[in-house]
């Protein structure tokens, strides 16, 4: 198992390198001149001479490769540069907004797991029953409703009509309910269906019959044998979901005025704030990769066939 | 020597319901299983051998059910038992060895877990005691390094080894009856003989009754004391093994015996 983790970790290095390179190049492909943007933000008239001076000052006159190496060298020391807009270190700004996004995402992940796993199991066990039909309708609605619309609906009913929860902002636990539920809703539908299908596939496997032949209790058969197999594809999909949720959080953040990374990122993008945009993309990329690594490890723990591959 | 009857199956009828009607699968199957004896059940595919086995442990597939007849285990009619009483009999009183050992085990659960959960379902034992019992029974089946084996996963073992593990699990609860549904079909020839020898050893040691289901007439001839021939849901002939093989009386039995592959038959065909 340790060997398996080491192998996965060593694969991380080239991936992270690739992400940093792509991040760096993509932003330079975007239209707009950062030096000019910087001058405008600082209320300096963007004359040709001022732009050239600013290019030299920001290091934008050097060849791309030199710029990249300079940037990378700083990034590995966690120095993400100074924001063009606020003139504050980018790292400090990230650490100001990121916890809010993380809190929202983690709550949504917990909600997704706690709601979709039991619904998935029961709708598979009572396939074709009342509960299964209800969960099917719920999933259909959840999967087809766009996040922004759902967010406003929730806000309208729970905050304005029923006055149960705060409308926008961050603070108490009550503030967290609607944004995280909005974010989790589509994923709850997806995972309910995924787990249901996966359970149904495994309910008629020969190993289930053999478990019955040995006289095992039904709850042991479902809980230990069927669920363990059924969770494998769910875990695989989950790796991608956590990353997607972080980006999905950007939309939810703007609906509920949640002071997270999303709003920070969008405003940086419109101001051509290169250091901030680069750092945000890089951070997202790293989180994506780390989530996938964690899922790989979880998969290895769950499925011994993966763990032993190439080791025998 | 007096033989003790363990299970009596009388006039067993099983129907499968389709959208339109009820299709009979078993039409009055009767036989009895005796302690320490091997009862062979032969017949072509679809003749109802496996359905008979499934009916005995009350694990018939959906839409099929026993409509008439009785299954008596030591004078207790299994048809009158509740689902939970029946569950307690499965594994403990009637054990079953499945046809394909490679797919019978859960691929993500260790051999040890399979073994321990079976023991702990039916006996009041700790994990430690269950582990010791498992090692003892794996040793009885002449499997090497049982302690290591328990930590392994099914895909790390060969089919022959898994079949032996399955037999070890089956005998560990010392059931009165072991149903072996095609126990050697999925194995290669050398393993087949070993498995049959081990089954033979076990029925002598524990006085277990074995219901051996097979379309392999060789396996039946090797192990069975009495044989029943099944054809489309009926037992067409029932006789001691030597009588059946030497003087078959029913035409279907004769046809079945003639359908065996043999060297002489190949020689005949080549000459033609």
Image: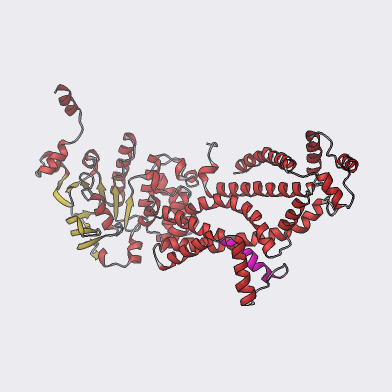
Left/right of residue A292 with respect to residue B80 in the rendered view = right
Say which residue appears at 64% left-offset and 41% top-offset: A6
Q: Is residue B192 above or below residue B79?
A: above
Magenta span includes A46: no
Instruction: Kindly tell me whether residue B131 is visible in this rendering.
Output: no
Q: Say how the picture is coloured.
A: secondary structure
Q: Tell me which corner region of the image, top left, top right, bottom left or bottom right, holds residue A111.
A: bottom right
Residue at the extreme bottom of the image, as rendered: A162
Residue B42: x %, y % from top left = 21, 45
Q: Tell me which corner region of the image, top left, top right, bottom left or bottom right, holds residue A203.
A: bottom left
| A101 vs B197, nearest the viewer | A101
Magenta span includes A181: yes
Say which residue appears at 66% left-offset and 48% top-offset: A290
Say which residue appears at 19% left-offset and 59% top-offset: B13
Residue A220: x %, y % from top left = 45, 60
Say which residue appears at 41% left-offset and 64% top-offset: A126
Instruction: Kindly tell me whether residue A240 is visible in this rendering.
Output: yes
Left/right of residue B63 with respect to residue A104 in the rendered view = left
Q: Is residue A74 above or below residue A104?
A: above
Residue A70: x %, y % from top left = 82, 38
Q: What segment carries the magenta color?
A: A172-185
| B125 vs B249, nearest the viewer | B249
Q: Is residue A161 above or below residue A32?
A: below
């Amino acid at each position: 198992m340790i060997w398996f983790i080491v192998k996965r970790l060593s694969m991380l290095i080239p991936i992270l390198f690739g992400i940093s390179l792509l991040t760096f190049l993509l932003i330079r492909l975007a239209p707009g001149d950062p030096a000019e943007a910087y001058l405008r933000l600082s209320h300096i008239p963007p004359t040709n001479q001022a732009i050239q001076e600013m290019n030299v000052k920001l290091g934008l006159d050097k060849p791309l490769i030199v710029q990249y190496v300079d940037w990378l060298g700083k990034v590995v020391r966690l120095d993400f540069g100074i924001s063009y807009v606020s003139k504050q270190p980018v790292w400090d700004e990230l650490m100001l907004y990121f916890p809010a996004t993380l809190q929202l995402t983690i709550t949504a992940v917990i909600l997704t797991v706690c709601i979709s796993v039991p619904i998935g199991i029961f709708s598979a066990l009572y396939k074709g029953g009342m509960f299964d039909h209800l969960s099917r309708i719920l999933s259909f609605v959840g999967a087809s409703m766009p996040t922004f619309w759902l967010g406003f609906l929730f806000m309208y009913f729970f905050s304005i009509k029923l006055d149960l929860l705060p409308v926008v902002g961050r603070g108490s636990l009550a503030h967290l309910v609607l944004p995280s539920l909005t974010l989790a809703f589509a994923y709850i539908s997806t995972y309910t269906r995924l787990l249901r299908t996966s359970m149904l596939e495994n309910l008629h496997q020969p190993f289930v019959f053999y478990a019955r032949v040995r006289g095992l209790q039904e709850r042991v058969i479902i809980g230990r044998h069927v669920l363990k197999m059924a969770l494998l594809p769910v875990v695989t999909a989950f790796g991608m979901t956590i990353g997607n949720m972080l980006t999905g959080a950007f939309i939810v953040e703007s609906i509920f005025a949640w002071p997270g990374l999303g709003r920070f990122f969008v405003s940086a993008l419109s101001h051509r704030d290169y250091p901030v945009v680069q750092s945000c993309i890089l951070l997202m990329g790293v989180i994506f990769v780390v989530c996938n690594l964690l899922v790989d490890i979880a998969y290895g723990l769950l499925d011994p066939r993966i763990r032993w591959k190439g080791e025998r | 020597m007096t033989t003790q009857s363990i299970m009596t199956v009388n006039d067993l009828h099983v129907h499968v319901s389709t959208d339109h009607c009820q299709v009979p699968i078993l039409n009055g199957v009767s036989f009895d299983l005796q302690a320490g004896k091997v009862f062979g059940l032969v017949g072509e595919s679809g003749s109802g051998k496996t359905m008979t086995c499934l009916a005995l442990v009350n694990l018939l597939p959906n839409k099929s059910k026993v409509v008439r007849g009785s299954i008596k285990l030591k004078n207790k009619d299994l048809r009158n038992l509740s689902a939970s009483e029946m569950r307690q009999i499965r594994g403990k009183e009637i054990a079953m060895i499945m046809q394909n050992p490679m797919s019978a085990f859960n691929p993500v659960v260790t051999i040890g877990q399979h073994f321990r959960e079976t023991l702990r379902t039916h006996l009041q034992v700790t994990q430690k005691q269950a582990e010791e019992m498992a090692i003892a029974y794996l040793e009885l089946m002449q499997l090497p390094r049982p302690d290591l084996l328990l930590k392994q996963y099914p895909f790390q073992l060969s089919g022959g080894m898994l079949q032996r593990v399955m037999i070890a699990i089956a005998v560990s609860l010392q059931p009165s009856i072991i149903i072996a549904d095609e126990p050697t079909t999925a194995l290669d020839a050398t393993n087949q003989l070993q498995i049959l020898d081990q089954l033979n050893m076990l029925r002598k040691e524990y006085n277990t009754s074995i219901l051996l289901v097979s379309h392999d007439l060789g396996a039946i001839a090797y192990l069975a004391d009495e044989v029943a021939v099944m054809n489309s849901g009926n037992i067409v002939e029932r006789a001691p093994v030597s009588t059946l093989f030497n003087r078959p009386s029913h035409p279907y039995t004769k046809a079945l015996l003639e359908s065996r592959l043999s060297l002489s038959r190949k020689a005949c065909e080549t000459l033609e």
